Amino acid sequence: MGIPQPAYYIFKCEQSAPPGMPKPSCVTPQTQDLFQYLATKLMQEGIMATVQPIRTSCMNRCQSGPVMLVEPGHTMYAGLTKEKIDRIVSEHIMNGNVVEEYVIDSEMWDEPISPADMKAQMGR
Ligand code: FES
């Protein structure tokens, strides 16, 4: 038997804009410990081996930050807090139920365009 794949990957945006930049960012002094909080939570639950947290750069949804993407499923959570992370881990990660009220607005996260369709649209 081989090494098991993770059941989930959790991509947490770790981009911070320099002070004074007009663009918002997912890491501010108030939110900079969210990744560590998530990682600690996964360790405390004893599920770190099968749930892989990953620090990413900007995922282009800064207006809704701090954001985090759960895969599989393309589930983007917005406006993260420690309380939201607790519920996402217990309801989504442990029990497979997406926490709909924390999911990013569909205006900001609509259905994907397949690469083949995008290429066709570009006329290439
Ligand atoms: S800075 Fe996090 S999505 Fe852009």
Image: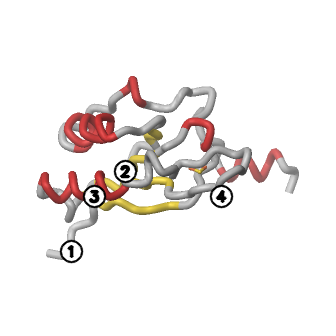
The residue indicated by pointer 2 is 34
Q: Nearer the viewer, residue 101 or 9?
A: 101
Amino acid type of the residue tagged 1 in the rendering: Ile
Q: What amino acid type is highlighted by mark number 4?
A: Pro
CA separation, marks 3 and 2?
Answer: 9 Å
Q: Amino acid at mark 3?
A: Ala
In the drawing, does residue 69 fall left or right of residue 45? right
> Spatial distance from mark 1 to mark 4, Cα to Cα?
41 Å
Q: Which residue is mark 4?
A: 18
The one of 56 and 122 positioned closer to us in this rendering = 56
Instruction: Determine whether label 2 and label 1 are within 8 Å by CB.
Output: no
Check if mark 3's residue and mark 2's residue have beta carbons within 8 Å.
no
Disc 2 secondary structure class:
helix
Q: Earlier in the sequence, mark 1 or mark 3?
A: 1
Q: Position of residue 102 (x, y in %)?
A: 40, 29
Q: Is residue 65 above or below residue 101?
A: below
Q: Residue at x 21, y 68 (%)?
A: 4
Q: Which mark is residue 3?
A: 1
* Image quarter of residue 109: top right
User: Is the distance from the Cβ of mark 3 to the nearest ligand 1 atom less than 8 Å?
Assistant: no
Looking at the image, is mark 1 or mark 4 earlier in the sequence? 1
